[in-house]
Image (cartoon, rainbow, N blue to C red):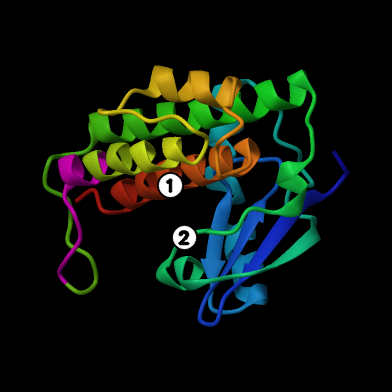
Amino acid sequence: MSKGTRVYLEVGGKRTFASAADWPGWSRSGKTPEAALEALASYAPRYAAIPKLARIEFPKYATQFEVVEKLEGNATTDFGAPGIPAKGESKPTTNVEHARLISLLEACWKYLDRIVAKAPAELRKGPRGGGRDRDKMFQHVLDAELEYGKGIGVRLKAPDRKALLAGFRNPKSDGRWPVAYAIRRTAWHALDHAWEIEDRIP
């Protein structure tokens, strides 16, 4: 990895996502590329808990960003999810690099589980008086992972993280997503909702 944090910028018509290429889960959005990078930097202290759980050192220079790819976003981007795989995510990785990404994904799951365990069932309402409560939000994350599994050729009838992890470790050739992107997307979704629950605890 380079000394700075490698970043993918996914630029849609209304929203941009900045995603740390080597740190699954660390992905934030803004109305402009500049705003997305600012949001990514502002979340570095919160994201630092994830490498700590994975027992991976999080560098002090983490917010020194190096944009390595600029991707053209789509409707998914504007809707609010990083929806475009980067070219770099199709390149082969070493076994060590691959295991590291999976460890960080597992840490995102562990963080989410801890937040869900300590949060009350009823969360503070959002700015417009809406938003899912704890159990519905957690179920939403699990349901989304069924779809993410399909991206790497894993078809599950019910949420099963062990089976999903097995798919990440040994992806099938008929998957439509590069496994690195599938890990990034899955980690982002889990951590994004973990932070939302955390922010809405009364």
Tag 1 and tag 2, C-beta contact below 8 Å: yes
- Say which residue appears at 61% left-offset and 49% top-offset: 44
Answer whether residue 112 is visible to the viewer in this image: yes
- Say which residue appears at 32% left-offset and 46% top-offset: 198
- The N terminus appears in which quarter of the rendering? top right
- Say which residue appears at 51% left-offset and 24% top-offset: 167
Q: Secondary structure at mark 2?
A: loop
| Residue for badge 1 | 189
Earlier sequence position, callout 1 versus callout 2:
2
Where in the figure is residue 120, as x and y percent of width and height?
15, 39
Q: Is residue 91 left or right of residue 129?
A: right
Q: Amino acid at mark 1?
A: His
| Residue for badge 2 | 81
In the rendered structure, which segment of residues is drawn in magenta? Answer: 129-138
Please determine whether, in this image, residue 97 is positioned above or below residue 134: above
Where in the figure is residue 189, as x and y percent of width and height?
43, 47
Of residue 53 and residue 20, the one placed in the foreground of this image is 20
Where in the figure is residue 19, as x and y percent of width and height?
63, 54
User: Among all residues in the image, which is located at the extreme front?
Assistant: 174
Q: Amino acid at mark 2?
A: Ala
User: Among all residues in the image, which is located at the extreme bottom?
Assistant: 13
